[in-house]
Image (cartoon, helix red, strand yellow):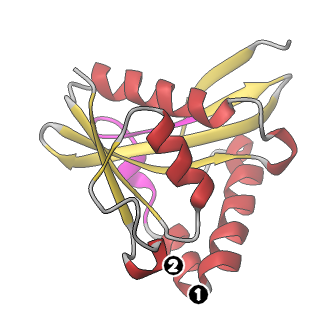
Amino acid sequence: MTTLEVRRVRQSDPDAARLVAELTYEYTSRYGPRGAEEMQRPADVFEPPHGQFLLLVEAGEAVAGGAFKRYDEETAELKRIWTHSQHRRKGLARRVVEELEKEARAFGYRQVYLTTGPRQPEAKALYLATGYTPLFDVDADPLSIGPLAFRKAID
């Protein structure tokens, strides 16, 4: 197995371009123009001192990544967690979540908040599997809820 390198970069870093492009396409294909709007929001919120954008790099290529930003004084909000389609089913998204939690803890955050879209069942399953508490009825039809919110203590 190849070693993964964790890189702290800006979302605009050329190494992130392939992941960001695929994530933008995915959001747009699942949610239409509203999905594209999410990726057009300013990414400087994912930069220190309140946020961070991370990549997992394997053999010089970004294979997964994600970010967090400040939600409130004690809470980081995870965003844009993504595994490139050619690298799925290897536990990389779980590793991104772990790295983001570790980094958020180092920034002084004590908990993490996140939302995922109702048309992303794989994301919902990831957050449930990694110890996040759903702030919605998990038995309800996700499309009747809207964004699916989660929270987790990290201190």
* Image quarter (top left, top right, bottom left or bottom right) of the C terminus: top left
Viewer-proximal residue among 115 and 71:
115
Element at label 2: helix
- Residue type at mark 1 is Pro
Q: Please say whether residue 107 is visible from this viewpoint.
A: yes
For residue 53: magenta? yes
- CA separation in Å, label 2 and label 1: 6 Å
Which residue is the extreme one toward the bottom? 33
Q: Is residue 30 above or below residue 66?
A: below
Q: What span is colored magenta in the figure?
A: 42-54
Q: Could you say where residue 104 lies in the image, as x and y percent from the top left?
A: 33, 29
Q: Is residue 63 left or right of residue 77?
A: right
Q: Which residue is mark 2?
A: 37
* Residue 106, quarter of picture: top left
* Image quarter (top left, top right, bottom left or bottom right) of the N terminus: top right
Residue at 86 percent across and 22 percent down: it is: 59
Q: Please say whether residue 10 is visible from this viewpoint.
A: no
Viewer-proximal residue among 61 and 121:
121
Residue at 30 percent across and 61 percent down: it is: 136
- Residue type at mark 2 is Glu
Q: Which residue is mark 1?
A: 33
Q: CB atoms at circles 2 and 1 under 8 Å apart?
A: yes
Q: Is residue 109 above or below residue 143?
A: above
Per the rendering, the mark at residue 90 is none
Report crowding for label 2: few under 14, some 14 to 19, many 20 or more residues within 10 A (C-alpha): few
Residue at 68 percent across and 29 percent down: it is: 91
Viewer-proximal residue among 62 and 121:
121
Which residue is the extreme one toward the front? 139
Q: Could you say where residue 93 lies in the image, as x and y percent from the top left?
A: 62, 37
